[in-house]
Amino acid sequence: MTPPATNGSQPMKELEFKGVFPAPPTPISEDGSVGEPALRALLEDNIANGVDGFWMAGSTGEGPILTEDQRETVARVSGEVTQGRALAIMHVGAISTASAAKAAKQAKVYGCAAVCCVPPIFFRSSERSQIDHYKAVADAADGLPFFVYNLPQLTQVETVPALMEKFMAAVPSIVGLKHSAVNFGDIRTFADMGLKCFSGNGALPLPALTMGAVGTVDAPPSVAPWHYAELFAAWERGDFARAQELQDGVAEIVDVVRMFGAPSDVTKAILSERLGIDCGRSIPPVERLTDEERADVMRRARELGLTERHAGVGV
């Protein structure tokens, strides 16, 4: 647990690895660089709407295909904007162990609160090579808390509880994971192991909390942070009726983000309109919307109020 954050003389909420951690897109400028003004605006928007932290450069953030320079910019901006107000968990997974370790070192330098990492990707890996990979990344992060990114749908490697025990024995800085695998029951097992288990399924934030998850990491909270923040707050104060009411409203938000199988491009389109600043397009070969698909997405997003500024947001 980190000390309570302060804003001048006014105490703010205590910063912990729990609650709503959007996995936002990475704004990209026409010249291919990270759109820093858009990234800062996005983070400010979400913080003003009550999120607890961020999962930066994950799959929606296109982290595995960012260049090292792009990834460094994301780490720097995230560390600067969130300092004392939210917790930035920086995803550092890369095709090579050396590149992932370099990113972990940068995350530490720029003030990110933790690192997260997928297992080795593309080349088939053994348990030993996965452990060696995580050890190298953790060592480079120099003491930062480490989260495993359990995303077998894309990595072809599932971190089941028995494998996680081996990871924990070899990498003492592991404190938790983002669990995006389909086996929902493992959330309870990971929680019983003392891990901070974030659910990676933005469609089921309340069921995940009842299973022992500490919060939600996914793309939908980046476009509707107020909804997810209120749901988590209702859960925390024991207002289960209100939490269930908000859970019932999650599906339509998630459906928009998942339209046409292009969450990166969808979230960039919605946030571009809401923030009034261009967040760019997804990075090829990540799926992009056609003009007709983008029009459909924006029509539905406007109907749900996702393109409107909410009270308290002043970017």
Image (cartoon, rainbow, N blue to C red):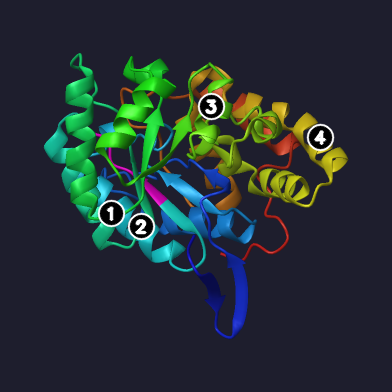
Residue closer to the observer: 225 or 96: 96
Residue denoted by label 1 = 107
Residue at the right extreme of this rendering: 241
The residues bearing labels 3 and 2 have C-alpha atoms spaced at a distance of 28 Å
Q: Which mark is residue 257?
A: none
The residues bearing labels 1 and 3 have C-alpha atoms spaced at a distance of 29 Å
Question: Is residue 7 on the magenta stretch?
Answer: no
Q: Which of the two discs, 2 and 4, labels the residue nearer the N terminus?
A: 2
The residue type indicated by label 4 comes to Gln
Residue at position x 19%, y 32% in the image: 133
Disc 2 and disc 1 in contact, CB within 8 angstroms: yes
Visible in this render: residue 71?
Answer: yes
Give the label, 4 or 3, closer to the camera: 3
Q: Which of the two discs, 3 and 2, labels the residue nearer the N terminus?
A: 2
The residues bearing labels 2 and 4 have C-alpha atoms spaced at a distance of 33 Å
Q: Which mark is residue 189?
A: 3
**Residue 78 position (above or below residue 179):** below
Residue bounds of the magenta highlight: 89-94
Provide residue 170's location: percent of width, then percent of height: 25, 36
Q: Which mark is residue 112?
A: 2
**Residue 206 position (above or below residue 82):** above
Q: Which of the two discs, 2 and 1, labels the residue nearer the N terminus?
A: 1
Disc 3 and disc 2 in contact, CB within 8 angstroms: no
Q: Which mark is residue 244?
A: 4
Residue at position x 50%, y 31% in the image: 190
The residue type indicated by label 2 comes to Cys
Give the label, 1 or 3, closer to the camera: 3
Residue closer to the observer: 230 or 262: 230
